[in-house]
Amino acid sequence: MEIRRESSEEVVEAARVADPQPEPGIGWADALGEDVENPPTARVHGRQLIEPDGTVHTLATCENRIKGQFELWVQNNALRAIAQVESTGDLERADKLMSAYVGDWGAGHYSWDGRYVRRARFESLPGINQLIYLLMVRCNLKETEEGVVELVRKYPRQCGELLRWALGNSPSPAAKKAVGDNGIRTGTQNESGRDPQLAFLETLNLTTEEQELIRKNRKAMKPMTLD
């Protein structure tokens, strides 16, 4: 499998977003408004993940609109959970949860750098899958959430390296260089005996604090299987 590099100038140019920086505590979804949605034309430049059968998946850099879309995904999940509690008839608990949500939203915990969004993109496998999906569907409208979940299951390390690049934590995927200057080649199989979820998370270049949080919550995280 190959991950091809675009020129640095093309990537920087493609990643530029003209929208102003949001004020402190305001998320990208609120700052961009209707512009948080993807434009009708798919983006061309990005990192490519090429499967052995030749299928190409392109990952965009993390544009501000994608940050906003991820914020909305986390917020909607919280609201959906509250609605589920309300549907059971426990209105008092639902009201308390809604009050807590509104307070947390106002405090910026549901913005890109807020507490719950950071947890979703670093500690939650569904959150990581969703972010990779948003980055891929920006370049190809035919990408599906189910397909991305399968990609992460099959190639956890490669997907982690791509995500780290998209978030700006790595100039290029860390892998052995192959012949030629147009790309790099990595293994297509999971390391024998390795938990693919751990292999994936190890590529994200987390801080010591974030690594400690993951270790504490490790038992609560569902392992990623290959069957």
Image (cartoon, rainbow, N blue to C red):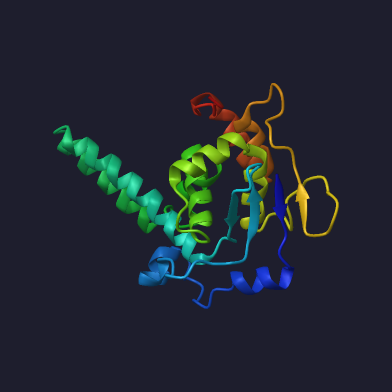
Q: Is residue 199 left or right of residue 63?
A: right
Closer to the camera in the image, 101 or 51: 51
Residue at horizontal 17 percent and vertical 36 percent from the top: 87
Instruction: Specify the quadrant of the image occupied by residue 80.
Output: top left
Residue at horizontal 57 percent and vertical 29 percent from the top: 216
Instruction: Specify the quadrant of the image occupied by residue 88.
Output: top left
Against 220, is 155 above or below? below
**Farthest residue in the top direction?**
193
Can residue 85 be seen? Answer: yes
**Farthest residue in the front direction?**
53
**Farthest residue in the left direction?**
89
Residue 20 point in image, percent of width and height: 50, 77
Instruction: Specify the quadrant of the image occupied by residue 53.
Output: top right
Closer to the camera in the image, 158 or 20: 158
Against 12, is 118 above or below? above
Q: Is residue 46 left or right of residue 115?
A: right
Can residue 26 be seen? Answer: no
Residue 75 point in image, percent of width and height: 36, 51
Against 116, is 64 above or below? below
Residue at horizontal 77 percent and vertical 51 percent from the top: 184
Against 192, is 186 above or below? below
Residue 194 point in image, percent of width and height: 68, 25
- Quadrant, the N terminus: top right
Residue 41 point in image, percent of width and height: 47, 70
Residue at horizontal 54 percent and vertical 74 percent from the top: 17
Q: Is residue 161 left or right of residue 44?
A: right
